[in-house]
């Protein structure tokens, strides 16, 4: 089985766009955080008090690459399956 790189690239971009498109889930119990991503939440933003003298772009964030890869694989499977069904329906 060959991996279609165009579909893989598209699914990776869709997984990244879910951070912006799908609303995050806010947790108020324990550490205040907002989790983004769909279906697995792979981008977490922690709401800590930040020292204003030391501002860093990714300070207080966590990117879980394993969940990101799972998201990409799930989206890849969905797109690949839909294209397969469409190609079989055209025959």
Image (cartoon, grey):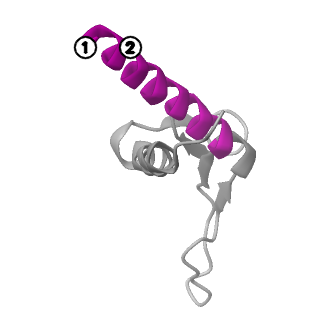
**Quadrant, the N terminus:** top right
Answer few, some or many: residues within 10 Å of disc 2's Cα (few below 14, many 20 plus, some between 14 and 19).
few
Q: Is residue 61 above or below residue 81?
A: below
Q: Is residue 60 above or below residue 33?
A: below
Q: Is residue 66 left or right of residue 14?
A: right
Residue 67 seen anywhere in this rendered image of the structure: yes
Q: Position of residue 33 (x, y in %)?
A: 60, 46
Q: Which residue is mark 2?
A: 85
* Residue 36, label in figure: none
Q: Residue furthest front?
A: 91
When asked about the image quadrant of residue 87, the answer is top left
Label 1 with label 2: CB-CB less than 8 Å: no
C-alpha distance separating marks 1 and 2 = 9 Å
Q: Residue at x 28, y 11 (%)?
A: 91
Q: Residue at x 48, y 52 (%)?
A: 9
Q: Residue at x 66, y 36 (%)?
A: 70
Q: Nearer the viewer, mark 1 or mark 2?
A: 1
Q: Position of residue 77 (x, y in %)?
A: 54, 27
Q: Which residue is mark 1?
A: 90
Q: Is residue 32 above or below residue 79?
A: below
Q: Position of residue 90 (x, y in %)?
A: 25, 13
Q: Residue furthest left?
A: 90
Q: The magenta stretch spans which residues?
A: 68-91
When asked about the image quadrant of residue 86, the answer is top left
- Sequence-earlier tag: 1 or 2: 2
Answer few, some or many: residues within 10 Å of disc 1's Cα (few below 14, many 20 plus, some between 14 and 19).
few
Q: Residue at x 57, y 40 (%)?
A: 72
Q: Nearer the viewer, residue 58 or 11?
A: 11
């Amino acid at each position: 089985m060959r991996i279609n790189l165009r579909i893989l690239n598209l699914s990776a971009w869709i997984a990244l766009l879910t951070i912006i498109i799908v609303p995050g889930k806010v947790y108020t119990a324990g550490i205040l955080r907002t989790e983004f991503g769909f279906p697995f939440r792979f981008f977490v933003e922690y709401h800590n008090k930040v020292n204003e003298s030391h501002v860093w772009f990714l300070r207080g964030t966590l990117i879980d690459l394993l969940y990101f890869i799972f998201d990409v694989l799930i989206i890849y499977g969905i797109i690949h399956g839909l294209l397969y069904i469409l190609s079989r329906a055209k025959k």
